[in-house]
Image (cartoon, grey):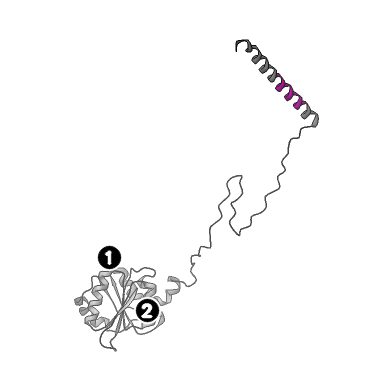
């Protein structure tokens, strides 16, 4: 997300504030509005580089802990692009050493400890307006953030399920599997003589059952 807070002066300098902390953003906007800057805010490190190229701001105030691209690498990419922007890192006390190292690497004019106030900006304003140091970290930018780094591959569909022991893999639409080997199933055959004997036995059994049923019903007739 990026948005601009314009001043009444069209020639006013622009400051790009990059931080994903809402309280810090609010404080910094107030500080630079008082100093009559055009204020643009960005909450994402990667997007901040694009905004820097688009705006060519006079001042960049950037946090170190940012999503997508940390503040140090974002600042190096800004310096690699060129321009005469002054970069100021902002960081909490626990990141003081990291902020010092990043300031030296990216050629920042200063780093300020959070929370930022008008007093802190006033006390460091002369340093912020001072000479822009070199950025020795540019020599290591390819190692820190190589362009040919491995990128995630987009998911192109479902992965085929692995086959269970003794079972073939489940095919997916458009995926051809190797044909299964032809299985020859042996079927039992019964010869005609054997089938004829079986039929005769069946008839005999049915006849016997019928005779017994008739005899039983006849024996009960006198009592009916």
Report if residue 207 lies within the magenta region. yes
> Could you give the CA–CA distance between mark 2 and mark 1, rounded to whole angstroms?
28 Å
Residue drawn at 24 percent across, 80 percent down: 32
Within the image, what quadrant is residue 49 found in? bottom left
Residue drawn at 36 percent across, 68 percent down: 67
Left or right? Give the position of 197 relative to 165.
right
Question: Which SS class for mark 1?
Answer: helix
Question: Which SS class for mark 2?
Answer: helix
Cβ atoms at labels 2 and 1 below 8 Å apart: no
User: What residue span does the magenta drawing correspond to?
Assistant: 197-208
- Provide residue 190's location: percent of width, then percent of height: 76, 32
Mark with earlier residue (2, 1)? 2
Residue indicated by mark 2: 51
Disc 2 crowd, CA 10 A, few/some/many (<14, 14-19, 20+): some
For the stretch drawn in magenta, what is the main secondary structure? helix
- Provide residue 108's location: percent of width, then percent of height: 32, 78
- Residue placed furthest toward the left: 119
Within the image, what quadrant is residue 23 found in? bottom left
Report if residue 88 lies within the magenta region. no
Residue indicated by mark 1: 94
Q: Nearer the viewer, residue 128 or 17?
A: 17
Q: Nearer the viewer, residue 173 or 147?
A: 173
- Provide residue 100's location: percent of width, then percent of height: 30, 72
């Amino acid at each position: 997300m990026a948005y601009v807070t314009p001043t009444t002066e069209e020639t006013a300098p622009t400051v790009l504030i990059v931080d994903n902390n809402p309280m810090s953003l609010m404080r910094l906007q107030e500080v630079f509005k008082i100093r009559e800057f055009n204020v643009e805010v960005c909450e994402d490190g990667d997007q901040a580089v694009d905004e820097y190229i688009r705006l060519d701001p006079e001042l960049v105030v950037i946090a170190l802990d940012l999503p997508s691209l940390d503040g140090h690498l974002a600042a190096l990419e800004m310096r690699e692009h060129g321009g005469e922007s002054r970069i100021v890192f902002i960081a909490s006390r626990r990141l003081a050493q990291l902020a010092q190292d990043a300031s030296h690497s990216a050629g920042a004019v200063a780093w300020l400890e959070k929370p930022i106030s008008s007093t802190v900006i006033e006390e460091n304003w002369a340093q912020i307006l001072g000479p822009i140091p070199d950025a020795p970290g540019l020599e290591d930018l390819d190692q820190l953030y190589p362009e040919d780094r491995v990128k995630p591959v987009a998911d192109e569909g479902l992965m085929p399920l692995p086959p269970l022991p003794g079972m073939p893999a489940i095919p997916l639409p458009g995926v051809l599997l190797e044909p299964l080997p032809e299985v020859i199933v042996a079927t039992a055959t019964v010869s005609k003589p054997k089938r004829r004997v079986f039929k005769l036995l069946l008839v005999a059994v049915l006849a016997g059952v019928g005779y017994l049923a008739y005899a039983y019903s006849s024996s009960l007739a006198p009592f009916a």
